[in-house]
Amino acid sequence: MEVVMSNQQIVWDQEIIEKYNYSGPRYTSYPTALEFHEAYTPAEFDMACTQYPERPLSLYIHIPFCHKLCYFCGCNKVITRHHHKADIYLDSLELEIRQRAALFTERKVTQLHFGGGTPTFLTKVQFTRLMSLLRGEFTFEEGAEISIEVDPREIELDMLDHLRDEGFNRLSIGVQDFNKEVQHLVNRDQDEDFIISMVQRAKDLGFRSTNLDLIYGLPKQSAESLALTIKRVLEMEPGRLSVFNYAHMPTLFAAQRKIKDADLPAPAEKLVMLQETIENLTGAGYQFIGMDHFALPDDELAIAQREGILHRNFQGYTTQGECDLLGMGVSAISMIGDSYAQNKKDLKEYYAQVDEKRHALWRGVALDQDDLIRREVIKQLICNFTLDTKAIEAEFNLDFDKYFAEDIKLLQTFINDELVTMHEGRIDVELRGRLLIRNICMCFDKYLRDRARQQQFSRVI
C-alpha cells in the first residue's frame, strides 16, 4: 500500500519497506566504528589535531552515570546513586580535558554537547566546576551552541535555571513514552506533568530549542498508545523530535534481558507505529529530517537541510559539520582531521590510563582517500537525499561513473524500484526511498561488501 505523507516529504510504500527492511549501519560515521582498531596511536591522534587548524571545534563530554537502569538502554553507563562517584570522575576528566585542550589553543569552540548516561546526574556545584574548567581551557565563540541530554525523573525544575546560567541553550529530554504500563516494563516511570513543566520552563528561560526523544517498539506499546503519546508531545510544541526504533539485542545489552520477547510488538505493528507517527508529525507541520528525526520548519536543522548544508556526526544530524569533534570522557568518540578516535569504554581502565598517560585513547582509524570520498557521498545522501556527482568529481578529481561502477550496480535495484533516480550529474532519493536511506547508502560502503557483517547492526526500520 502506498500512502503519501503530508507536505510531500515522504511516500510510505509498505511492500517496498518490507522488501528492504534488513540490518544496516546508522552512518553516524563512515567508516563505522566496526573499523576502529587498537593499532591507532596517540601520535596519529596528535597529527590529526594539526591537520585542519582553521576548523572550529565541537566538544562532546560523556557523563556515564545514571540513577536507575532503563531496560531498553544500550548506552555506556554506570548505575549508582552516589554523587561522590561523579567527583572522582570529574577529577580524571579534568586531567584529560587539560591535556587535550593544549592541542587546540588556537581553535574556537562553536558547539558543546553533554551526553551519557545521564549528564544531569551531576549536581549544580559539579556542573559549575566542569563548565568553569571548560571555559578556562577552551575559547568559546560567543553564542556557541551548548546542549545537554536530560532525564526528567531525577532533576529539580530549577536545575534548568542553573544550566541556563552556565550557558546551556539547548535541551534534549528523554520521554520515550507516556504510557504508564510501557514505562513500568522498561523501568522508567516518570511524571508527565513535570515534563510539560520542564518544556515550558525551558521556553520561559530562553533555551533556543528543546528536543524530545521517543522510542517505538517498546514492550506492550501499541500504535494506539504511541499515538496518544505523540498527541501529548505535539501539544508541547518542541522544536525537534527524535523517534527511535527500539532494537532488541539482549545478547549485546544485558539490561534488555529483563524485557520479555512476548511483550514486544510484532514487526508489522512496529511499522504501523512508524507510519502513523510520521503521518502525525508531518501533518502537524514538522519536517522529516531523515531516519528518526523531525524538526519544525524554522529550526536550524530544517533550514540547513533545505539549503543542502546539513551534516551528520556521532551525535546524529547537526548544523555544525565543518567542525573537528573532540570527545572527552569514558567511551567518547572524536572526529579529528581525517581520523576517528575512541576513548576507553571501561571506567576502571579509563581512570587507570588517564592517571598514567593523561589521555584515554583506546582505538581509532585514519581515513584514506577512498574513505573520504565515500564519507562525503554517504553524508550528502543521508542528510540531503540528493548527491551532486559533478561536485564529487571536481572535489576529488575522479570520474564518478567509473570510480563507483560497482556501487552503481548495487544501487540498480533501488533505481529499478523507482526509489532512486540517476540524472546527468545528480542522484536523487525519491520520496518513496527516503525511509530506506540507510540501505541506499550501504551501496557505497566498501566495508559492507562482505554481507555477513550486517548481523552486527540493527534493522533499518
Image (cartoon, rainbow, N blue to C red):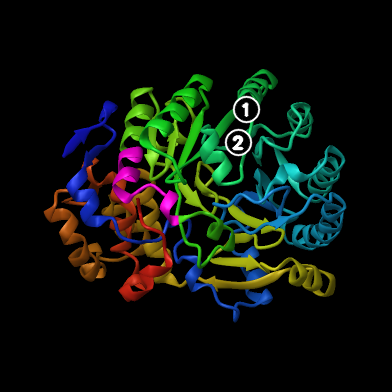
Q: Residue farthest to the left?
A: 416
Residue 305: image x %, image y %?
40, 38
Name the foreground residue: 251 vs 331.
251
* Boundaries of the magenta span: 261-274
Q: Earlier in the sequence, mark 2 or mark 1?
A: 2
Q: Which mark is residue 139?
A: none
Q: Which residue is mark 2?
A: 173
For marks 2 and 1, give the one nearer the viewer. Answer: 1
Q: Is residue 366 visible?
A: yes
Q: Amino acid at mark 2?
A: Ile
Mark 2 is surrounded, within 10 Å at the Cα level, by few (under 14), some (14 to 19) or many (20 or more) other residues, namely some
- Expressed as whole percent of the image width and height from the top left, the position of residue 361 reads 68, 70
Number of marks in the rendered image: 2
Q: Secondary structure at mark 1?
A: helix
Q: Which disc number belongs to residue 195?
A: 1
Query: Would you say the residues marked 2 and 1 are in contact, meaning their CB atoms lie under 8 Å apart?
Result: yes
Residue 399 position within the rendered picture, expressed as x and y whole percent measured from the top left: 24, 65
Q: Residue at x 86, y 45 (%)?
A: 129
Residue 52 location in percent, x, y? 59, 59
**Residue 235 part of the magenta-drawn span:** no
Q: Quadrant of the N terminus?
A: top left
Task: Please state if 357 lies on the left or on the right of 258 as rendered.
Answer: right
Q: Secondary structure at mark 2?
A: strand
Residue placed at 48% from the left, 39% from the top?
242
Vertical arrangement, residue 81 with respect to residue 88, above or below: above
Which sits in the foreground, 143 or 214?
A: 214
